[in-house]
Every structure is written in C-alpha cells, then in structure tokens.
Amino acid sequence: MSKKFKDTRLGQFLKGKGSHIADFVGDVLPSEGLLGVLKNVIAKDNTLPPQDKEEALKRLEFDLIEMQEVTKRWVADSKGSKLTQNVRPLTLIFLTVSFVIGWFLQIDELEVVKELLTITFLAYFGGRSVEKIKNR
C-alpha cells in the first residue's frame, strides 16, 4: 500500500509546478532518506520561486509525518493479539466450514454464504498474490 513519489503531496505539487525534481525522482517509492535528500534539493533549487519552495517544504513535512504514522500503525498491528493478527485467516476458515456444513445439510439459503466465501477468497488470495507480485 506504499505510495510512489508522484502520488505524494510533494510529488503532485512539484509536478504541477513543472519542476524537474518530480521527473527526476519519477516512480520511486518515497523513504525518509529520499525525502530528506529532497529537502536539501528543494532548498537549493533556483528554478522554484521562494513561496513555492516554502509550500513544497510544508508538503514534504506532511509526507514525512504520514509515513511515520503509517509505520507506527503497522508496528502496532504486528504487536497486537493473536486474534488481531489472524482475523483474516479465521474469517476464511469460518466461511469455508460454514459452506461445507451447509452443503452437506443441503441448506437452501447457502447462496449468501457462497457469495461471501467467493468474495473472501478473491480478496484474500487475490490481494496476497498482488502484494507478492508488486514486491518483486
């Protein structure tokens, strides 16, 4: 769920101003180190007017804060209880068992469970596959 530089507040601002910095950085995923380097580049850039430099630096600070908060949330999620760490697999198991039991008992209202199970399978396995492909 990481944003590329062009999708950050700073990237959009610089692109809108026609700055060469946005083209130079391109689709790189922002990191605190990269944004720190960009802070120095923006401060020394002679092509940006002073008010645009000030606006760019403010947007850079917002992007840094956003990255830090996302990291804090991920750390908190990973340190959560076993239940919060396993809620997706447990949901998948519950719906699968419900569907199998309903199928054996020949319950007529099984379509609702089947639809939920299909959505869950697609979201869980499809989402995991996309994450793995993107991280290559």
Image (cartoon, rainbow, N blue to C red):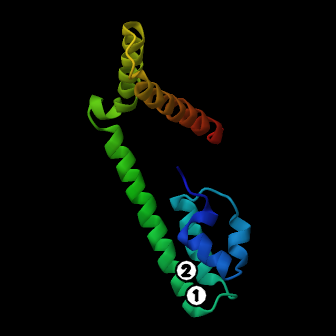
Name the element at disc 1. Answer: helix
Q: Relative to 32, does residue 94 appear above or below in the rendering?
A: above
In the displayed image of the protein, which residue is found farthest to the front? Answer: 108
Residue drawn at x 35%, y 25% as measured from the top left: 90
Q: Where is residue 45 in the image (x, y as percent from the top left)?
A: 66, 83
In this rendering, the count of numbered labels is 2
The three-letter code of the residue at mark 2 reads Ala
Q: Nearer the viewer, residue 34 or 10?
A: 10
Q: Relative to 9, does residue 136 appear above or below in the rendering?
A: above
Name the element at disc 2. Answer: helix
Residue tagged by mark 1?
Answer: 52
Which quarter of the picture shows residue 16? Answer: bottom right
Q: Position of residue 11 (x, y in %)?
A: 61, 70
Q: Are marks 1 and 2 in contact (CB under 8 Å)?
A: yes
Q: Which of 32 and 62 is in front in this view?
A: 62
Residue tagged by mark 2?
Answer: 56
In the displayed image of the protein, which residue is found farthest to the bottom? Answer: 50
The three-letter code of the residue at mark 1 reads Asp
